[in-house]
Image (tube, helix red, strand yellow):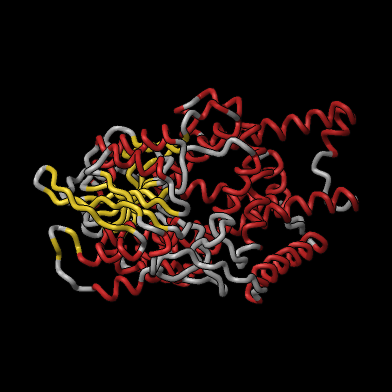
Amino acid sequence: MFIFILQVRHMIEGHPEIYMFAIYSAFIWGMWLLKLILSSRYRPFTGEFSGTTSVIVPVVDEPLDLFRDVIGRMVEQRPGEIIVVINGAVNVALQEVCDEFAPLVRWVHTPIPGKRNAVMIGTELSTGEITVLVDSDTVWTDNTLSELVRPFADPSVGGATTRQRILEPERSWITRWADWLENSRALYSMPAQSVVGQVGCLPGRTIAFRRSIMIRVMDRFMTERFMGVFLEVSDDRTLTNLTLKEGFRTVYQHTSLVFTDAPLQVKKLYKQQLRWARGSQYNTLRMLPWMLGHAPLLAVFFIMDIVLPFLLAGVIAGWVYRAVTGQGYNFYSGILTEYGAGSGVALVVGLMVVSSVLSMAIRQLRHLSEKPSDFFRLPVFIIVSTAFLMPIRLIGFFRMGHASGWGTRAGAYGGGASHDTAVSEHAGEPLVDGVDAADEALLRDIGFDDHRSTTHGGTLLVASPRRAAQTRIAAPQRPARRTLNPKAAWPYLIGFTIFALEAIVIVNF
Protein backbone atom coordinates (compact mmCIF):
# COMPACT_ATOMS: atom_id res chain seq x y z
CA MET A 1 0.00 0.00 0.00
CA PHE A 2 2.90 2.37 0.82
CA ILE A 3 4.46 2.00 -2.65
CA PHE A 4 1.05 2.04 -4.32
CA ILE A 5 0.19 5.42 -2.76
CA LEU A 6 3.55 6.92 -3.77
CA GLN A 7 3.24 5.66 -7.34
CA VAL A 8 -0.35 6.86 -7.77
CA ARG A 9 0.58 10.29 -6.44
CA HIS A 10 3.55 10.40 -8.81
CA MET A 11 1.34 9.61 -11.84
CA ILE A 12 -1.36 12.09 -10.76
CA GLU A 13 1.28 14.82 -10.60
CA GLY A 14 1.83 14.37 -14.33
CA HIS A 15 4.97 12.25 -14.51
CA PRO A 16 5.09 10.01 -17.62
CA GLU A 17 6.01 6.74 -15.91
CA ILE A 18 3.49 3.88 -15.95
CA TYR A 19 3.81 1.70 -12.86
CA MET A 20 2.60 -1.86 -13.23
CA PHE A 21 2.50 -2.29 -9.47
CA ALA A 22 -0.01 0.55 -9.23
CA ILE A 23 -2.14 -1.11 -11.92
CA TYR A 24 -1.79 -4.51 -10.21
CA SER A 25 -2.79 -3.07 -6.83
CA ALA A 26 -5.73 -1.19 -8.34
CA PHE A 27 -7.05 -4.44 -9.81
CA ILE A 28 -6.59 -6.25 -6.48
CA TRP A 29 -8.50 -3.57 -4.56
CA GLY A 30 -11.14 -3.23 -7.27
CA MET A 31 -11.88 -6.96 -7.24
CA TRP A 32 -12.01 -6.98 -3.44
CA LEU A 33 -14.46 -4.08 -3.36
CA LEU A 34 -16.65 -5.78 -5.97
CA LYS A 35 -16.71 -9.01 -3.96
CA LEU A 36 -17.30 -7.11 -0.73
CA ILE A 37 -20.31 -5.23 -2.11
CA LEU A 38 -21.90 -8.27 -3.77
CA SER A 39 -21.26 -10.69 -0.90
CA SER A 40 -22.86 -8.28 1.59
CA ARG A 41 -26.17 -9.03 -0.17
CA TYR A 42 -25.79 -12.81 0.20
CA ARG A 43 -28.31 -14.82 2.20
CA PRO A 44 -28.41 -18.65 2.39
CA PHE A 45 -31.47 -20.42 0.99
CA THR A 46 -34.20 -21.30 3.47
CA GLY A 47 -36.76 -23.10 1.26
CA GLU A 48 -37.85 -26.67 1.91
CA PHE A 49 -36.96 -29.28 -0.71
CA SER A 50 -38.85 -32.56 -0.45
CA GLY A 51 -37.40 -34.46 -3.41
CA THR A 52 -35.20 -37.56 -3.39
CA THR A 53 -31.41 -37.63 -3.28
CA SER A 54 -28.67 -39.97 -4.45
CA VAL A 55 -25.14 -39.63 -3.08
CA ILE A 56 -22.30 -40.81 -5.34
CA VAL A 57 -18.84 -41.37 -3.86
CA PRO A 58 -16.02 -42.09 -6.34
CA VAL A 59 -13.10 -43.71 -4.53
CA VAL A 60 -9.77 -45.28 -5.41
CA ASP A 61 -8.24 -45.84 -2.00
CA GLU A 62 -8.71 -44.28 1.43
CA PRO A 63 -7.65 -45.13 4.99
CA LEU A 64 -10.42 -47.43 6.22
CA ASP A 65 -11.12 -45.50 9.43
CA LEU A 66 -11.55 -42.26 7.50
CA PHE A 67 -13.69 -43.90 4.81
CA ARG A 68 -15.90 -45.60 7.41
CA ASP A 69 -16.38 -42.25 9.16
CA VAL A 70 -17.18 -40.52 5.86
CA ILE A 71 -19.81 -43.09 4.88
CA GLY A 72 -21.21 -43.37 8.40
CA ARG A 73 -21.88 -39.62 8.60
CA MET A 74 -23.69 -39.75 5.25
CA VAL A 75 -25.82 -42.69 6.38
CA GLU A 76 -26.90 -40.74 9.49
CA GLN A 77 -28.43 -38.07 7.24
CA ARG A 78 -30.55 -40.64 5.37
CA PRO A 79 -30.27 -39.79 1.67
CA GLY A 80 -32.32 -41.94 -0.69
CA GLU A 81 -29.26 -44.03 -1.59
CA ILE A 82 -25.47 -43.95 -1.42
CA ILE A 83 -23.57 -45.40 -4.38
CA VAL A 84 -19.84 -45.94 -3.90
CA VAL A 85 -17.98 -46.31 -7.20
CA ILE A 86 -14.64 -48.01 -6.57
CA ASN A 87 -12.43 -47.33 -9.58
CA GLY A 88 -9.08 -48.82 -10.50
CA ALA A 89 -7.86 -51.93 -8.73
CA VAL A 90 -10.31 -54.11 -6.80
CA ASN A 91 -10.35 -53.01 -3.16
CA VAL A 92 -11.98 -55.66 -0.99
CA ALA A 93 -11.49 -53.65 2.22
CA LEU A 94 -13.51 -50.72 0.85
CA GLN A 95 -16.19 -53.13 -0.35
CA GLU A 96 -16.48 -54.58 3.14
CA VAL A 97 -16.88 -51.12 4.66
CA CYS A 98 -19.70 -50.41 2.22
CA ASP A 99 -21.36 -53.71 3.11
CA GLU A 100 -21.38 -52.66 6.76
CA PHE A 101 -23.88 -49.93 5.83
CA ALA A 102 -26.02 -51.95 3.42
CA PRO A 103 -28.74 -51.70 2.23
CA LEU A 104 -28.58 -47.89 2.10
CA VAL A 105 -25.03 -48.10 0.76
CA ARG A 106 -24.25 -50.17 -2.33
CA TRP A 107 -21.00 -50.35 -4.22
CA VAL A 108 -19.91 -50.98 -7.76
CA HIS A 109 -16.47 -51.42 -9.22
CA THR A 110 -15.00 -50.25 -12.51
CA PRO A 111 -11.44 -51.14 -13.47
CA ILE A 112 -11.06 -47.81 -15.30
CA PRO A 113 -9.30 -45.32 -13.01
CA GLY A 114 -10.62 -41.78 -13.12
CA LYS A 115 -13.20 -39.66 -11.37
CA ARG A 116 -15.24 -38.73 -14.46
CA ASN A 117 -15.88 -42.32 -15.41
CA ALA A 118 -16.91 -43.04 -11.81
CA VAL A 119 -19.27 -40.05 -11.82
CA MET A 120 -20.82 -41.26 -15.06
CA ILE A 121 -21.41 -44.79 -13.75
CA GLY A 122 -22.81 -43.54 -10.44
CA THR A 123 -25.15 -41.11 -12.19
CA GLU A 124 -26.47 -43.81 -14.50
CA LEU A 125 -27.18 -46.07 -11.51
CA SER A 126 -28.75 -43.35 -9.37
CA THR A 127 -32.49 -42.76 -9.03
CA GLY A 128 -32.78 -39.57 -6.94
CA GLU A 129 -33.91 -36.21 -8.27
CA ILE A 130 -30.76 -34.62 -6.86
CA THR A 131 -27.35 -36.17 -7.46
CA VAL A 132 -24.81 -35.34 -4.75
CA LEU A 133 -21.16 -35.95 -5.65
CA VAL A 134 -18.85 -36.39 -2.67
CA ASP A 135 -15.08 -36.85 -2.48
CA SER A 136 -14.15 -39.93 -0.50
CA ASP A 137 -12.15 -37.94 2.07
CA THR A 138 -14.85 -35.34 2.76
CA VAL A 139 -16.47 -35.40 6.20
CA TRP A 140 -20.03 -34.12 6.57
CA THR A 141 -21.24 -32.18 9.59
CA ASP A 142 -24.75 -32.13 11.07
CA ASN A 143 -27.40 -31.20 8.50
CA THR A 144 -24.95 -31.01 5.59
CA LEU A 145 -27.40 -32.74 3.24
CA SER A 146 -30.64 -31.11 4.40
CA GLU A 147 -29.08 -27.65 4.10
CA LEU A 148 -27.40 -28.41 0.77
CA VAL A 149 -30.66 -29.32 -0.97
CA ARG A 150 -32.60 -26.26 0.23
CA PRO A 151 -31.72 -24.21 -2.88
CA PHE A 152 -33.41 -26.81 -5.11
CA ALA A 153 -36.80 -25.67 -3.81
CA ASP A 154 -36.22 -22.96 -6.42
CA PRO A 155 -36.69 -24.61 -9.83
CA SER A 156 -34.20 -22.22 -11.44
CA VAL A 157 -31.34 -23.65 -9.35
CA GLY A 158 -29.43 -26.41 -11.09
CA GLY A 159 -26.38 -26.83 -8.86
CA ALA A 160 -25.29 -26.03 -5.30
CA THR A 161 -22.23 -26.47 -3.16
CA THR A 162 -21.26 -26.32 0.50
CA ARG A 163 -18.99 -24.29 2.69
CA GLN A 164 -15.69 -26.15 2.92
CA ARG A 165 -12.98 -26.15 5.58
CA ILE A 166 -9.82 -28.17 6.26
CA LEU A 167 -9.71 -30.93 8.87
CA GLU A 168 -7.53 -30.11 11.88
CA PRO A 169 -5.83 -27.07 10.33
CA GLU A 170 -3.40 -26.77 13.24
CA ARG A 171 -1.46 -29.83 12.01
CA SER A 172 1.01 -27.79 9.92
CA TRP A 173 1.51 -24.43 8.26
CA ILE A 174 0.21 -25.97 5.00
CA THR A 175 -3.12 -27.06 6.48
CA ARG A 176 -3.46 -23.73 8.30
CA TRP A 177 -2.81 -21.82 5.07
CA ALA A 178 -5.17 -24.06 3.06
CA ASP A 179 -7.96 -23.57 5.60
CA TRP A 180 -7.44 -19.81 5.55
CA LEU A 181 -7.65 -19.83 1.74
CA GLU A 182 -10.85 -21.90 1.79
CA ASN A 183 -12.45 -19.61 4.35
CA SER A 184 -11.56 -16.48 2.38
CA ARG A 185 -13.27 -17.90 -0.70
CA ALA A 186 -16.29 -18.84 1.39
CA LEU A 187 -16.56 -15.32 2.80
CA TYR A 188 -16.02 -13.30 -0.38
CA SER A 189 -15.88 -15.00 -3.80
CA MET A 190 -18.51 -17.70 -3.33
CA PRO A 191 -21.29 -15.54 -1.83
CA ALA A 192 -20.56 -12.72 -4.30
CA GLN A 193 -21.07 -15.03 -7.27
CA SER A 194 -24.02 -16.79 -5.65
CA VAL A 195 -25.90 -13.48 -5.33
CA VAL A 196 -26.19 -13.35 -9.13
CA GLY A 197 -26.80 -17.11 -9.37
CA GLN A 198 -23.56 -17.74 -11.22
CA VAL A 199 -21.01 -19.46 -9.00
CA GLY A 200 -18.37 -20.14 -11.64
CA CYS A 201 -17.01 -23.26 -9.98
CA LEU A 202 -18.99 -25.32 -7.50
CA PRO A 203 -16.15 -26.96 -5.53
CA GLY A 204 -16.55 -30.69 -5.81
CA ARG A 205 -15.79 -31.97 -2.31
CA THR A 206 -19.56 -32.02 -1.91
CA ILE A 207 -21.57 -30.74 -4.84
CA ALA A 208 -25.21 -31.27 -5.85
CA PHE A 209 -26.92 -31.14 -9.26
CA ARG A 210 -30.32 -32.00 -10.57
CA ARG A 211 -29.97 -35.49 -12.01
CA SER A 212 -31.93 -34.46 -15.11
CA ILE A 213 -29.18 -31.94 -15.90
CA MET A 214 -26.44 -34.51 -15.28
CA ILE A 215 -28.08 -36.91 -17.73
CA ARG A 216 -28.43 -34.23 -20.41
CA VAL A 217 -24.84 -33.02 -20.19
CA MET A 218 -23.11 -36.35 -19.52
CA ASP A 219 -21.95 -36.92 -23.08
CA ARG A 220 -20.31 -33.50 -23.20
CA PHE A 221 -18.87 -34.01 -19.71
CA MET A 222 -17.22 -37.23 -20.87
CA THR A 223 -15.98 -36.10 -24.27
CA GLU A 224 -15.31 -32.33 -24.30
CA ARG A 225 -11.84 -31.46 -25.48
CA PHE A 226 -9.77 -28.31 -25.26
CA MET A 227 -6.99 -27.53 -27.72
CA GLY A 228 -7.22 -31.05 -29.04
CA VAL A 229 -6.89 -32.95 -25.75
CA PHE A 230 -9.27 -34.37 -23.16
CA LEU A 231 -8.44 -33.04 -19.70
CA GLU A 232 -10.01 -34.98 -16.84
CA VAL A 233 -8.94 -32.37 -14.30
CA SER A 234 -11.49 -29.82 -13.07
CA ASP A 235 -14.55 -32.05 -13.36
CA ASP A 236 -16.43 -29.84 -10.89
CA ARG A 237 -15.80 -26.69 -12.95
CA THR A 238 -16.83 -28.52 -16.14
CA LEU A 239 -20.12 -29.68 -14.61
CA THR A 240 -20.73 -26.14 -13.35
CA ASN A 241 -20.11 -24.74 -16.84
CA LEU A 242 -22.52 -27.20 -18.41
CA THR A 243 -25.20 -26.46 -15.81
CA LEU A 244 -24.92 -22.72 -16.47
CA LYS A 245 -25.11 -23.29 -20.22
CA GLU A 246 -28.31 -25.26 -19.70
CA GLY A 247 -29.84 -22.07 -18.30
CA PHE A 248 -29.81 -22.96 -14.58
CA ARG A 249 -28.43 -21.02 -11.64
CA THR A 250 -25.48 -22.28 -9.60
CA VAL A 251 -25.40 -21.24 -5.95
CA TYR A 252 -23.55 -21.48 -2.67
CA GLN A 253 -25.19 -22.66 0.56
CA HIS A 254 -23.21 -21.27 3.48
CA THR A 255 -25.18 -23.25 6.08
CA SER A 256 -24.04 -26.60 4.66
CA LEU A 257 -20.56 -27.31 6.00
CA VAL A 258 -18.06 -30.07 5.18
CA PHE A 259 -14.47 -30.75 6.17
CA THR A 260 -11.80 -32.18 3.91
CA ASP A 261 -8.13 -33.03 4.07
CA ALA A 262 -5.20 -31.05 2.67
CA PRO A 263 -1.74 -32.18 1.57
CA LEU A 264 0.89 -32.25 4.27
CA GLN A 265 3.86 -32.10 1.90
CA VAL A 266 4.87 -29.17 -0.29
CA LYS A 267 5.32 -31.44 -3.32
CA LYS A 268 1.76 -32.78 -3.05
CA LEU A 269 0.43 -29.28 -2.42
CA TYR A 270 2.20 -28.09 -5.56
CA LYS A 271 0.66 -30.87 -7.64
CA GLN A 272 -2.80 -30.16 -6.25
CA GLN A 273 -2.58 -26.42 -6.89
CA LEU A 274 -1.11 -26.95 -10.37
CA ARG A 275 -4.00 -29.28 -11.24
CA TRP A 276 -6.47 -26.67 -10.03
CA ALA A 277 -4.66 -23.87 -11.87
CA ARG A 278 -4.73 -25.74 -15.16
CA GLY A 279 -8.35 -26.78 -14.75
CA SER A 280 -9.52 -23.32 -13.79
CA GLN A 281 -7.77 -21.51 -16.62
CA TYR A 282 -8.57 -23.90 -19.45
CA ASN A 283 -12.20 -23.86 -18.39
CA THR A 284 -12.13 -20.05 -18.31
CA LEU A 285 -10.92 -19.86 -21.91
CA ARG A 286 -13.32 -22.59 -23.04
CA MET A 287 -16.22 -20.83 -21.28
CA LEU A 288 -15.20 -17.25 -22.14
CA PRO A 289 -17.42 -16.72 -25.23
CA TRP A 290 -20.49 -17.85 -23.26
CA MET A 291 -19.55 -15.78 -20.20
CA LEU A 292 -19.07 -12.59 -22.24
CA GLY A 293 -22.59 -12.98 -23.62
CA HIS A 294 -24.44 -14.36 -20.59
CA ALA A 295 -22.35 -13.75 -17.46
CA PRO A 296 -20.09 -10.68 -17.88
CA LEU A 297 -19.53 -10.37 -14.14
CA LEU A 298 -18.30 -13.95 -14.02
CA ALA A 299 -16.03 -13.21 -16.98
CA VAL A 300 -14.44 -10.35 -15.01
CA PHE A 301 -13.75 -12.63 -12.02
CA PHE A 302 -12.08 -15.33 -14.09
CA ILE A 303 -10.21 -13.06 -16.52
CA MET A 304 -8.64 -11.32 -13.53
CA ASP A 305 -7.67 -14.76 -12.23
CA ILE A 306 -5.52 -15.19 -15.36
CA VAL A 307 -4.31 -11.60 -15.75
CA LEU A 308 -3.09 -10.91 -12.20
CA PRO A 309 -0.22 -13.47 -12.16
CA PHE A 310 1.09 -12.03 -15.44
CA LEU A 311 0.87 -8.52 -14.03
CA LEU A 312 2.74 -9.56 -10.89
CA ALA A 313 5.48 -11.11 -13.02
CA GLY A 314 5.76 -7.79 -14.86
CA VAL A 315 5.94 -5.91 -11.55
CA ILE A 316 8.85 -8.05 -10.34
CA ALA A 317 10.62 -7.79 -13.71
CA GLY A 318 10.23 -4.00 -13.62
CA TRP A 319 11.76 -3.78 -10.14
CA VAL A 320 14.72 -5.92 -11.19
CA TYR A 321 15.24 -3.93 -14.42
CA ARG A 322 15.20 -0.56 -12.64
CA ALA A 323 17.47 -1.83 -9.87
CA VAL A 324 20.05 -3.09 -12.38
CA THR A 325 19.93 -0.11 -14.75
CA GLY A 326 19.38 2.59 -12.15
CA GLN A 327 16.52 4.02 -14.18
CA GLY A 328 13.20 5.26 -12.88
CA TYR A 329 12.18 7.65 -10.18
CA ASN A 330 13.56 7.01 -6.70
CA PHE A 331 10.63 7.32 -4.31
CA TYR A 332 12.83 6.83 -1.29
CA SER A 333 15.54 9.45 -1.93
CA GLY A 334 13.92 11.92 0.47
CA ILE A 335 13.76 9.39 3.30
CA LEU A 336 17.33 8.20 2.66
CA THR A 337 18.61 11.78 2.61
CA GLU A 338 16.77 12.66 5.79
CA TYR A 339 17.64 9.58 7.85
CA GLY A 340 20.82 8.30 6.22
CA ALA A 341 21.47 5.03 4.42
CA GLY A 342 21.16 2.61 7.34
CA SER A 343 18.19 4.11 9.17
CA GLY A 344 16.53 5.17 5.92
CA VAL A 345 16.59 1.66 4.45
CA ALA A 346 15.25 0.20 7.71
CA LEU A 347 12.46 2.79 7.74
CA VAL A 348 11.51 2.10 4.12
CA VAL A 349 11.47 -1.68 4.69
CA GLY A 350 9.43 -1.22 7.85
CA LEU A 351 6.88 0.98 6.09
CA MET A 352 6.57 -1.57 3.26
CA VAL A 353 6.01 -4.47 5.66
CA VAL A 354 3.53 -2.63 7.88
CA SER A 355 1.55 -1.26 4.93
CA SER A 356 1.43 -4.69 3.26
CA VAL A 357 0.18 -6.34 6.44
CA LEU A 358 -2.45 -3.64 7.00
CA SER A 359 -3.53 -3.85 3.36
CA MET A 360 -4.01 -7.61 3.58
CA ALA A 361 -5.67 -7.30 7.00
CA ILE A 362 -8.33 -5.02 5.53
CA ARG A 363 -9.02 -7.48 2.71
CA GLN A 364 -9.09 -10.39 5.18
CA LEU A 365 -11.20 -8.63 7.81
CA ARG A 366 -14.02 -11.20 7.77
CA HIS A 367 -11.64 -14.10 8.32
CA LEU A 368 -9.72 -12.22 11.02
CA SER A 369 -12.96 -11.41 12.83
CA GLU A 370 -13.54 -15.19 13.07
CA LYS A 371 -9.93 -15.96 13.97
CA PRO A 372 -8.13 -12.87 15.34
CA SER A 373 -4.92 -14.78 16.11
CA ASP A 374 -4.28 -15.15 12.37
CA PHE A 375 -3.41 -11.44 12.24
CA PHE A 376 0.07 -12.36 13.45
CA ARG A 377 0.37 -14.91 10.63
CA LEU A 378 -0.48 -12.39 7.91
CA PRO A 379 3.13 -11.99 6.67
CA VAL A 380 3.41 -15.76 6.14
CA PHE A 381 0.00 -15.86 4.44
CA ILE A 382 1.05 -13.03 2.10
CA ILE A 383 4.36 -14.67 1.20
CA VAL A 384 2.90 -18.13 0.59
CA SER A 385 -0.11 -16.85 -1.35
CA THR A 386 2.07 -14.64 -3.56
CA ALA A 387 5.41 -16.42 -3.91
CA PHE A 388 3.89 -19.93 -4.12
CA LEU A 389 0.52 -19.55 -5.82
CA MET A 390 1.29 -16.94 -8.47
CA PRO A 391 4.09 -18.93 -10.20
CA ILE A 392 1.87 -22.03 -10.15
CA ARG A 393 -0.88 -20.05 -11.90
CA LEU A 394 1.58 -19.12 -14.65
CA ILE A 395 2.85 -22.68 -15.05
CA GLY A 396 -0.76 -23.89 -15.18
CA PHE A 397 -1.53 -21.40 -17.95
CA PHE A 398 1.39 -22.50 -20.11
CA ARG A 399 0.58 -26.21 -19.64
CA MET A 400 -3.14 -26.00 -20.42
CA GLY A 401 -2.79 -27.91 -23.69
CA HIS A 402 -0.73 -30.78 -22.27
CA ALA A 403 -2.53 -34.10 -22.00
CA SER A 404 -2.96 -34.97 -18.34
CA GLY A 405 -5.41 -36.52 -15.92
CA TRP A 406 -5.55 -36.93 -12.16
CA GLY A 407 -2.42 -39.05 -12.15
CA THR A 408 -0.19 -41.29 -14.17
CA ARG A 409 -2.06 -44.57 -13.70
CA ALA A 410 -2.07 -46.79 -16.74
CA GLY A 411 -5.47 -47.32 -18.27
CA ALA A 412 -6.91 -44.12 -16.88
CA TYR A 413 -9.99 -42.69 -18.48
CA GLY A 414 -9.11 -40.83 -21.65
CA GLY A 415 -12.31 -39.25 -22.89
CA GLY A 416 -15.49 -40.91 -24.13
CA ALA A 417 -18.30 -42.87 -22.53
CA SER A 418 -17.09 -46.30 -21.50
CA HIS A 419 -20.51 -47.97 -21.55
CA ASP A 420 -22.23 -46.33 -24.51
CA THR A 421 -23.03 -49.72 -26.00
CA ALA A 422 -24.64 -51.04 -22.83
CA VAL A 423 -26.79 -47.98 -22.32
CA SER A 424 -27.91 -47.73 -25.95
CA GLU A 425 -28.80 -51.42 -26.11
CA HIS A 426 -31.10 -51.17 -23.08
CA ALA A 427 -32.39 -47.62 -23.45
CA GLY A 428 -36.11 -47.35 -22.72
CA GLU A 429 -36.48 -50.77 -21.10
CA PRO A 430 -38.93 -50.86 -18.16
CA LEU A 431 -38.14 -51.26 -14.49
CA VAL A 432 -37.72 -54.86 -13.37
CA ASP A 433 -38.33 -55.60 -9.68
CA GLY A 434 -37.58 -51.96 -8.81
CA VAL A 435 -34.22 -51.93 -10.66
CA ASP A 436 -33.81 -50.36 -14.11
CA ALA A 437 -32.96 -53.03 -16.68
CA ALA A 438 -30.37 -50.73 -18.21
CA ASP A 439 -28.69 -50.48 -14.80
CA GLU A 440 -28.65 -54.26 -14.51
CA ALA A 441 -27.11 -54.56 -17.94
CA LEU A 442 -24.56 -51.89 -17.06
CA LEU A 443 -23.48 -53.76 -13.95
CA ARG A 444 -23.15 -56.96 -15.94
CA ASP A 445 -21.13 -55.19 -18.60
CA ILE A 446 -18.71 -53.64 -16.13
CA GLY A 447 -18.03 -56.98 -14.55
CA PHE A 448 -20.61 -57.61 -11.84
CA ASP A 449 -23.40 -60.03 -11.12
CA ASP A 450 -26.43 -58.58 -9.39
CA HIS A 451 -28.02 -60.14 -6.33
CA ARG A 452 -31.36 -58.91 -5.06
CA SER A 453 -32.47 -58.96 -1.45
CA THR A 454 -35.60 -57.48 0.01
CA THR A 455 -35.42 -55.43 3.19
CA HIS A 456 -37.99 -53.05 4.64
CA GLY A 457 -40.22 -53.75 1.67
CA GLY A 458 -37.74 -52.48 -0.92
CA THR A 459 -35.77 -54.25 -3.61
CA LEU A 460 -32.04 -53.69 -3.31
CA LEU A 461 -29.18 -54.26 -5.67
CA VAL A 462 -25.91 -55.47 -4.16
CA ALA A 463 -23.01 -55.84 -6.55
CA SER A 464 -20.48 -58.64 -6.22
CA PRO A 465 -17.32 -59.07 -8.28
CA ARG A 466 -17.08 -61.45 -11.20
CA ARG A 467 -13.97 -62.45 -13.13
CA ALA A 468 -12.38 -59.41 -14.76
CA ALA A 469 -11.90 -61.45 -17.93
CA GLN A 470 -15.65 -61.45 -18.40
CA THR A 471 -15.90 -57.65 -18.52
CA ARG A 472 -16.97 -56.43 -21.92
CA ILE A 473 -17.47 -52.69 -21.94
CA ALA A 474 -15.48 -51.09 -19.12
CA ALA A 475 -12.21 -52.96 -19.51
CA PRO A 476 -9.20 -50.75 -18.82
CA GLN A 477 -8.19 -48.75 -21.84
CA ARG A 478 -4.71 -49.24 -23.20
CA PRO A 479 -2.86 -45.96 -22.75
CA ALA A 480 -2.40 -44.25 -26.08
CA ARG A 481 1.07 -43.36 -27.27
CA ARG A 482 1.74 -39.73 -26.53
CA THR A 483 2.25 -37.47 -29.52
CA LEU A 484 3.02 -33.79 -29.75
CA ASN A 485 -0.06 -31.62 -29.77
CA PRO A 486 0.52 -28.53 -31.95
CA LYS A 487 -2.38 -26.73 -30.30
CA ALA A 488 -0.57 -26.90 -26.95
CA ALA A 489 1.73 -24.17 -28.30
CA TRP A 490 -1.04 -21.55 -28.15
CA PRO A 491 -0.79 -20.85 -24.39
CA TYR A 492 2.97 -20.46 -24.75
CA LEU A 493 2.52 -18.04 -27.66
CA ILE A 494 -0.06 -16.01 -25.74
CA GLY A 495 1.96 -16.03 -22.51
CA PHE A 496 5.25 -14.96 -24.10
CA THR A 497 3.45 -12.27 -26.07
CA ILE A 498 2.13 -10.86 -22.80
CA PHE A 499 5.64 -10.96 -21.32
CA ALA A 500 7.02 -9.19 -24.42
CA LEU A 501 4.44 -6.41 -24.14
CA GLU A 502 5.25 -6.00 -20.45
CA ALA A 503 8.96 -5.75 -21.31
CA ILE A 504 8.22 -2.97 -23.80
CA VAL A 505 6.26 -1.07 -21.15
CA ILE A 506 9.03 -1.55 -18.55
CA VAL A 507 11.81 -0.35 -20.88
CA ASN A 508 9.97 2.54 -22.54
CA PHE A 509 7.68 3.83 -19.82
Position of 390 relative to 72 (above/below) = below
Q: Quadrant of residue 333?
A: top right
- Give the residue drawn at x 35%, y 40%: 96
Please state if 496 lies on the left or on the right of 374 as rendered.
right
How many numbered discs sit on the rendered protein? Answer: 0
- Location of residue 22 in the rendering, given as x and y in whole percent from the top left corner: 67, 50
Q: Nearer the viewer, residue 9 or 341?
A: 341
Q: Quadrant of residue 98?
A: top left
Q: Nearer the viewer, residue 402 or 385?
A: 402
Q: Nearer the viewer, residue 481 or 274?
A: 481
- Location of residue 1 in the rendering, given as x and y in whole percent from the top left corner: 65, 40
Q: Nearer the viewer, residue 381 or 139?
A: 139
- Give the residue drawn at x 86%, y 27%: 339
Position of 152 relative to 363 (above/below) = below
**Which quadrant: the C terminus?**
bottom right
Position of 347 relative to 132 (above/below) = above
Instruction: Give the residue at the far left of this rendering.
Output: 457
Instruction: Give the residue at the far top of this rendering.
Output: 373
Is residue 80 among what the camera can see? yes
Please state if 476 lies on the left or on the right of 326 as rendered.
left
- Location of residue 335 in the rendering, given as x and y in whole percent from the top left corner: 82, 33
Please state if 304 lies on the left or on the right of 327 as rendered.
left
- Location of residue 18 in the rendering, given as x and y in whole percent from the top left corner: 73, 57
Is residue 40 among what the camera can see? no
Please state if 49 lies on the left or on the right of 162 as rendered.
left
- Give the residue drawn at x 69%, y 50%: 21
